């Protein structure tokens, strides 16, 4: 046996040193893979447009499912009556602030409303992160499945319909508009798409491919055809009610939504003074493999998925206190999912309490947006330390076996149970067999608000694309200031000045506190002269550069939306004369897209005149 070396080291001490080194490397690797959620944007049924609105719906056990609104039937009219048409519908999806994004009217009409929604929600997510001026390497991963808008196409396709539809263009247009230069990809794994994007974005951050990443998904129900196909599978609820885990579960109902999260490595977020909504500690993606059927879920695959995500996070089963399930409310899917969770978490966790949630009971199944909306629900549950009720749950499905577990389905807003783990899991499974699971932890409290009390604030900047939008924005901010505490005023000033983009109509406001700021903003909103407000040239240098970075939630940008739709009677129903006119017009306009001459305000030409005789559907600012 070897003795000590000249340095006094023994084989055992050298082995222990090696183990310590390996542990340090593993800790560093996990640190690089720990990701902060620093920004959020979303739309969901029930008028949900931000996290506070989402929580109000969830905490009240609200059900946002309804019959399709009449104005949403589009060119298909009574055809909707031939399919299940209760769903989680957004109010209006054909509107967009096209000039804001540099999109000409004729191009906007051909642009898939899913792409329109992504533009808005991604912009709002970057604003929420205080990174609207970010110019570093930023990646983008977009989950998108449906292509219903192609069925609205009026006759022969053209370049605008080609680039305005298609999954790759959803991601590509967004990256182009925002100036993103990192890895960019559209992801279609069916219902798991948006949670898979979170996993991919986390990997890109860990390998250093980007410093910031956007991940999320979108889904709109724009044609009855896809609903007809889903109904044929037997997956849709005949009465349009989604009842996860319940004995009466008979399928899901289709729904719409969009969610985007902004991600950074946690160490970078802390270094940069970012506000952290939640922390992603682990994630995993796998496939069902050779299951009993191509679209059938697999207990073994789902169990392995959750176990892999736990290992990736360095956590154990007892660390999980809440799971936002896939929870489609199908007779086959729910028992398989709960059995897999029982194998991975419930029984190995020693029957520790674990609450099970399912946002599909509130919203319907938002398909390619479902994973990210589930992620946002789990983030809210961690923030409020409570689990919302699952609507329509009264009696446990007799096929679900909870023996040996501490699983419980809340029927009211339930505080985080004593003895439950501090982390949450989120599951999303695709009909194609691709599964994803993400493990979240809450954000640690920051003491920066107290430090900001000593900061002397001289004022802030506020801007919008147009004077009209600026007046609306100023009014929203003035109202919001009534809820801002004095110690948060420096964060208000920083977020507006440096966390939002500097747009064409830009004002510097001199205000040392909330009262002065509110008075100046009210004057701007009403169009009155205000000595404290100075309009700036677009290229002016930024003001108030000494403000410390602290991001505050503020009202989202006030979009000046207009409605853009194909000429009346779309979906191939127009007369040939109108089709030929539109085709000649758009062939001439194609050069504008290919040659990239849409800088600034998109020009109007012959094809953009708002002439009802050409069937152009462009309505006034909302």
Image (tube, rainbow, N blue to C red):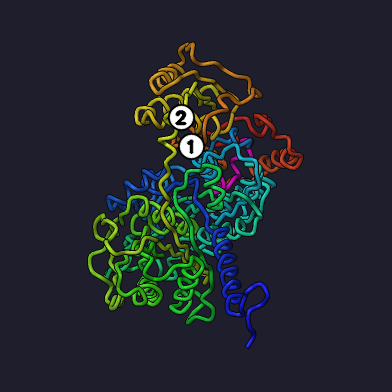
User: Is the stretch drawn in magenta largely helix, strand or loop?
Assistant: helix
Q: How many marks?
A: 2
Query: Which is nearer the N-term, disc 2 or disc 1?
Result: 2
The image quadrant where one finds the N terminus is: bottom right
The location of residue 275, given as percent across then percent down, is 47, 43
Near-viewer residue (178 or 583): 178
Q: Is the residue 145 above or below the residue 97 in the image? A: below
Q: Residues within 10 Å of mark 1 (few under 14, many from 20)?
A: many
Is any atom of residue 397 visible in this view?
A: yes
Horizontal side of 260 relative to 183 (left or right) equals left
In the drawing, what numbered circle is on residue 490? 2
Near-viewer residue (578 or 48): 48
**Magenta region: which residues?**
104-116
User: Dots 2 and 1: beta carbons under 8 Å?
Assistant: yes
Q: Secondary structure at mark 1?
A: loop
* Residue ID at (60%, 33%): 99
Q: Secondary structure at mark 2?
A: helix
* Residue ID at (58%, 24%): 543
The location of residue 254, given as percent across then percent down, is 42, 58
Picture quadrant where residue 21 is located: bottom right
Is any atom of residue 569 visible in this view?
A: no
């Amino acid at each position: 046996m070897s003795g000590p070396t000249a340095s006094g080291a023994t084989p055992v001490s050298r082995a222990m040193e090696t183990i310590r080194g390996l542990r340090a490397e593993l800790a560093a690797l996990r640190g690089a893979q720990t990701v902060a959620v620093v920004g959020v944007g979303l739309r969901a049924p029930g008028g949900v447009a931000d996290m506070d609105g989402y929580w109000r719906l969830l905490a009240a056990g609200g059900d946002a499912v309804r019959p399709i609104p009449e104005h949403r039937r589009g060119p298909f009219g009574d055809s909707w009556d031939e399919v299940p048409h209760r769903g989680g519908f957004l109010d209006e999806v054909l509107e967009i602030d096209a000039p804001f994004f540099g999109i000409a009217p004729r191009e906007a009409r051909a642009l898939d409303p899913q792409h329109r929604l992504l533009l808005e929600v991604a912009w709002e997510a970057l604003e929420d992160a205080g990174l609207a001026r970010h110019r570093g390497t930023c990646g983008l991963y977009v989950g998108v499945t449906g292509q219903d808008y192609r069925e609205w196409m009026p006759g022969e396709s053209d370049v605008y319909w080609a680039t305005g539809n298609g999954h790759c263009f959803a991601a590509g247009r967004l990256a182009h508009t925002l100036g993103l230069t990192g890895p960019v990809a559209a992801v279609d794994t069916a219902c798991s798409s948006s949670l898979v994007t979170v996993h991919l974005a986390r990997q890109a951050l860990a390998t250093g491919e980007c410093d910031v990443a956007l991940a999320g998904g979108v889904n709109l129900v724009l044609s009855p055809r896809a609903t007809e196909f889903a109904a044929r599978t037997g997956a849709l609820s005949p009465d349009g009610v989604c009842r996860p885990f319940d004995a009466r579960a008979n399928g899901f109902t289709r729904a719409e939504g969009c969610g985007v999260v902004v991600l950074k490595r946690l160490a970078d977020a802390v270094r940069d003074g970012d506000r952290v909504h939640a922390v992603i500690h682990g994630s995993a993606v796998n496939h069902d493999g050779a299951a009993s059927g191509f679209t059938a879920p697999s207990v073994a695959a789902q169990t392995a998925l959750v176990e892999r995500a736990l290992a990736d996070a360095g956590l154990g089963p007892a660390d999980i206190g809440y799971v936002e399930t896939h929870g489609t409310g199908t007779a086959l899917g729910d028992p398989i999912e709960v059995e897999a969770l029982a194998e991975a978490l419930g029984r190995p966790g020693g029957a520790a309490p674990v609450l099970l949630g399912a946002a599909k009971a509130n919203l319907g199944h938002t398909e390619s947006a479902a994973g990210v909306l589930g992620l946002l629900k789990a983030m809210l549950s961690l923030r409020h330390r409570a689990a919302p009720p699952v609507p329509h749950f009264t009696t446990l499905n007799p096929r679900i076996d909870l023996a040996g577990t501490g699983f419980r389905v809340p029927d009211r807003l339930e505080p985080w149970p004593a003895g439950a783990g501090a982390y949450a899991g989120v599951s999303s499974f695709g009909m194609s067999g691709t599964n994803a699971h993400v493990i979240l932890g809450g954000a640690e409290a920051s003491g920066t608000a107290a430090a900001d009390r000593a900061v002397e604030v001289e004022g802030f900047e506020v801007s919008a694309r147009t004077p009209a939008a600026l007046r609306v924005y100023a009014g929203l901010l003035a109202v919001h200031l009534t809820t801002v505490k004095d110690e948060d005023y420096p964060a208000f000033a920083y977020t507006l000045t440096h966390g939002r983009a500097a747009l064409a109509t830009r004002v510097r406001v001199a205000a040392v506190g909330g009262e002065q700021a509110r008075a100046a903003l009210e004057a701007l909103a009403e169009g009155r002269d205000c000595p404290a407000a100075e309009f700036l040239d677009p290229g002016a240098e930024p003001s108030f550069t000494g403000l410390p970075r602290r991001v505050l939630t503020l009202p989202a940008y006030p979009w000046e939306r207009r409605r853009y739709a194909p000429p009346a009677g779309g979906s191939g129903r127009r007369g040939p004369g109108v089709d030929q006119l539109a085709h000649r017009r758009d062939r001439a306009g194609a050069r504008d897209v290919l040659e990239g001459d849409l800088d600034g305000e998109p020009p109007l030409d012959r094809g953009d005149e708002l002439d009802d005789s050409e069937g152009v559907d462009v309505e006034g600012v909302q």
